[in-house]
Image (cartoon, grey):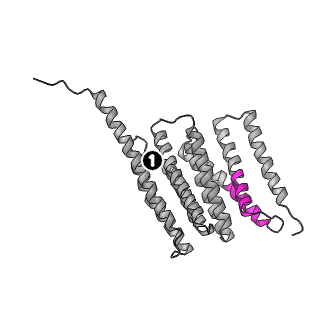
Amino acid sequence: MKLPPVLAERVVPAASAARLERDRSFLIFAAVVLMAIGLGFKSELLGPGQVWALALGLVVLAAPALLGYLRGTEEFPRIEHYIPVALGAITLAGLSLLVPELWKYLLLTAVFGTGFIIAARLDYLRLREAEKRGHLILQEAILILVLSGAYLVVVALPFNSILRLLWIFTITFFASYRSFRINGVAITPRRAFIFAIFVAQVVTFLAWAITALSLYLYVADGWFAAMLLIAWYINRGLVRHTVEDSFTRNVVLEYGAFAIVLVYMFVVSYQPSR
């Protein structure tokens, strides 16, 4: 007596569900490993140079983990998918040198691991065209969070002026490139590269102006990082809406308000008596 063949539609969903669950478990495991490495930044046996070397090792270790998780579609995972973990590693390494309390650093490490999982999961869904309405807001929030942290670390640590400007340019370029490629309608890699350079130039020029006018401006580290973040947000948004031809009255009012805030921050920081 012959048994009827198993219907394909009864088997495929179960296999797909198992594969999806396995992917999530692997992602959580990778995040735990990266968090363990991040906790090593706080070791008293490491000097500042060794902390930055270990941060580079964290990125190198995270890259194949992300590649193994994201691959499986016709589009091979590009560099923009690795940018959040790179900016997060910079932020975590710098904060290990700036934050003395261990419990605060443990909390920051947990935030880093959670952000890694969320960003990778959202990229996974985007590559498979399974995004939902609120995913864009989460992507934007994660990018702004790691970018603001990276800015704060760069301006707070005792780098020389040239190195600080190079850091700011590099961080701004990568954040802008990911934004143009991931957040919203994807811009082609070549155009996103050029536009990211434009945005990075403007933000770096602002950082240079603040540094050059240090005799007349009193800008705290957090204030400095906030000014850079606002400048990035304005210029990134102007480029995005120009490319998409989506300027409206609300868009103009939004960026105009941020520009007023930036000018106000300059005016408040001005102290001619110094």
x and y percent of residue 53 in the render? 50, 69
Q: What residue is shown at x 57% (from left), y 58% (from top)? A: 107
Residue 186 occupies which quadrant of the picture? top right
Residue 103 occupies which quadrant of the picture? bottom right
Disc 1, SS: loop
- Residue type, mark 1 in image: Pro
Q: Is residue 222 left or right of residue 101?
A: right
Q: Is residue 70 left or right of residue 148?
A: left
Residue farthest front in this picture: 103
On whether residue 223 falls in the magenta region, the answer is yes
Point out the stretch of residues depicted in magenta.
201-230
Name the residue carrying label 1: 77
Residue 75 appearing in the image? yes
Q: Is residue 11 left or right of residue 225?
A: left
x and y percent of residue 172 in the render? 63, 55
Q: What residue is shown at x 49% (from left), y 39% (from top)? A: 126
Secondary structure predominantly adopted by residues drawn in magenta: helix
On whether residue 132 falls in the magenta region, the answer is no
Residue 17 occupies which quadrant of the picture? top left
> Which of the two residues, 269 or 204, is positioned nearer the viewer here?
269
Residue 193 appearing in the image? no
Q: Quadrant of the N terminus?
A: top left
Residue farthest right in this picture: 273
Q: Residues within 10 Å of mark 1 (few under 14, many from 20)?
A: some
Instruction: Note whether 52 is above or below 21 in the view shown.
Output: below
> Which of the two residues, 128 or 243, is positioned nearer the viewer here?
128
Q: What residue is shown at x 46% (from left), y 55% (from top)? A: 31
